[in-house]
Image (cartoon, grey):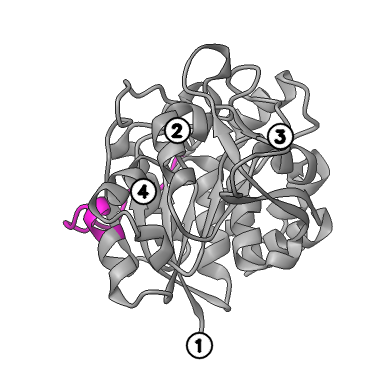
Amino acid sequence: MPRSLVIDTDTASDDAIALLLAVRDPEVAVRAVTVVAGNVPLPLAVRNAIVTLDLCGASDIEVHAGAASPLSRSLETAQYVHGEDGMGGVSLPDPSRQETSADAVAQLVAFANEQPGLHELVTLGPLTNVALALREDPELLAKYKCTTMMLGSPDGVGNVNALGEYNAWADPEATAAVLEAPGTKTMVGWNISRRYAVITPVMQDRLRSLGRLGAFAVAINAVVDQYCRDTGLAGYDLPDPIAMAIAIDDTIATDASDEFLVVGLDGPTRGATLPDRRFERPAPTCRVIWEADQNAFLEKLVAACTL
């Protein structure tokens, strides 16, 4: 029986590839997609999720719209990275439908209680939806089998400010609430993406050669590619896809530790997610990934894009 995933996303270009990885993997079944504002405003994130599912032949998967802004802050998107539409301005088909009517936050609670331990949760964006669901059910994450989060930069190298990774930075109050909540959690940070998930021009050519899904994966990241080159990477990196790959196949993570994480809320530490390793620190709150198998990730990406 395939494992059941619930995916929470702020769908832009790398989220779309993460959805592709999940939908195309024969070992998992995507139960639903919940959407949060982040990389792009909520209506665009919903549209991008539906279009991606359509292109993957998965238009039957539920898509639920959630929070349109962070818990206590104004939304600050990452459109300067992903393009105004979040998908690099590529011409894409119209979505086949509107989002499913049920609210994402209510659905996250419902899935957790449907059969505790059945579903696994994967988060690809700011944690606003999850934090709101925790207000409804403080045991929420303990009722999911596990939660894998693309979140943070535990080595202290940020991509929004000196220390903050975007998903944690966009709604740091939500990040703190989720990390403090009981449940089995794994954090796959930007430290993993920039080291093990950079798609070089050679790899881009290989993906294009695989057919329409590979071409889609490259095309929607053209704006990200330029941004990443301008900021020193050898190509565009894929934070959400490598988090999804580890959620599907944990052997891709080759080094991890259990940590008590502290979250920066304001000023130059906003969005920081750093281990507190003092001698008398509190009990660990999250498993943190430190190293990954780059070749295994790229093989999974190629398999997902091969028709």
- The residue under label 1 is which amino acid type? Met
Mark 4–mark 2 Cα distance, whole angstroms, equals 17 Å
Q: Residue at x 74, y 37 (%)?
A: 194
Observer-side mark, 1 or 3, equals: 3
Residue wearing tag 3 = 278
As helix, strand or loop, the secondary structure at mark 3 comes to loop
Q: Amino acid at mark 4?
A: Val
Q: Nearer the viewer, mark 2 or mark 1?
A: 1
Report the residue at 50% width, 27% height from top. Answer: 169
Q: Residues within 10 Å of mark 2 (few under 14, many from 20)?
A: many
Write down the residue under mark 2: 39
Nearer the N terminus, badge 2 or badge 1? Answer: 1
Query: Residue 1, which numbered label?
Result: 1
What's the magenta region?
91-108
Q: Residues within 10 Å of mark 3 (few under 14, many from 20)?
A: few
- The chief SS type of the magenta part is loop
What is the x, y in percent for residue 289?
71, 50
Q: Amino acid at mark 2?
A: Asn
Element on which disc 2 rests: loop
Sequence-wise, the earlier of marks 1 and 4 is: 1
Residue at image location 40% in from the left, 40% down from the top = 177
Residue carrying label 4: 130
Residue at image coords 29%, 70%: 113
What's the distance in space between the residues labelled 3 and 2, CA to CA? 34 Å
